[in-house]
Image: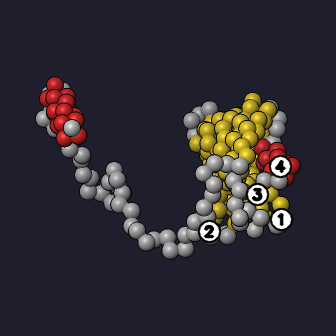
Amino acid sequence: MKTAIWASAALALALAFDLAGQSAPPERTVVDDPNYLPRVTPIKPGMAPKMKVDPLPAVPSRSFRVNFSTGDELMSGMTEFAEKNNLKISEVRGLGGISSAVVSAYDPEKGAFKRFNIDQKGELVSLQGEITVQNGKPAFHAHVVFVLVDGTVHGGHLVEAHINPVANLFVNEYDSPKAGN
């Protein structure tokens, strides 16, 4: 029975290519230039010997939707939220709008984070973050991507973001034996 299904699927695919005037899928062009990568780049196994894995429950223990409005500062609000709810290990994602923001990126030559000011309205198109425990208190850390009206994209470690008109963040907390460490 399975063989008949596969044979029917193969026949349908062959007919589709024949109807389109092609005898087979088009070949991919191979570019002989070191600045270009193949469509699927081979991954070398064994290149992360220090990787550690902490199992988490399949389902979050608590989930929240955190809504911000015009004038709210996101880092301040998320820090207060994490402390009030005693969050220990959480994933955070979100989107929204900003009137201004500050992001940073690590400069290995200086050994410090370089500051970038965003002094115009834009869209927060992606926020990926976490809440962990540092020095006994919940700490919020996020990476963001903003797009501005002219289409330029800015991103990095979130330092501050002033919301306009709204931002919605979704927080999933997980129980973990290491959460308090």
Q: Earlier in the sequence, mark 4 or mark 1?
A: 4
Between marks 3 and 4, how big is the CA–CA gap? 9 Å
Label 4: element kind: loop
Extreme-top residue of the structure = 19
Q: Which residue is mark 1?
A: 136
Label 2: element kind: loop
Q: Amino acid at mark 4?
A: Asn
Q: Which mark is residue 108?
A: 2
Circle 1: is it few (<14), some (14-19), or many (20+) Cα within 10 Å?
few
Between marks 4 and 1, how big is the CA–CA gap? 14 Å
Q: Which residue is mark 4?
A: 85
Q: Amino acid at mark 3?
A: Lys
Q: Is residue 143 above or below residue 23?
A: below
Residue appearing at x 26%, y 52% in the figure: 31
Label 3: element kind: loop
Q: Amino acid at mark 1?
A: Gly
In x, y percent, where is residue 35?
36, 57
Q: Is residue 146 above or below residue 31?
A: above
Residue appearing at x 78%, y 43% in the figure: 74
Between marks 1 and 2, how big is the CA–CA gap? 29 Å
21 vs 37, left or right, is left
In x, y percent, where is residue 114?
69, 59
Q: Which mark is residue 88?
A: 3
Circle 2: is it few (<14), some (14-19), or many (20+) Cα within 10 Å?
few
Residue appearing at x 24%, y 47% in the figure: 29
Q: Earlier in the sequence, mark 1 or mark 3?
A: 3
Q: Is residue 5 visible?
A: yes
The front one of 98 and 141 is: 141
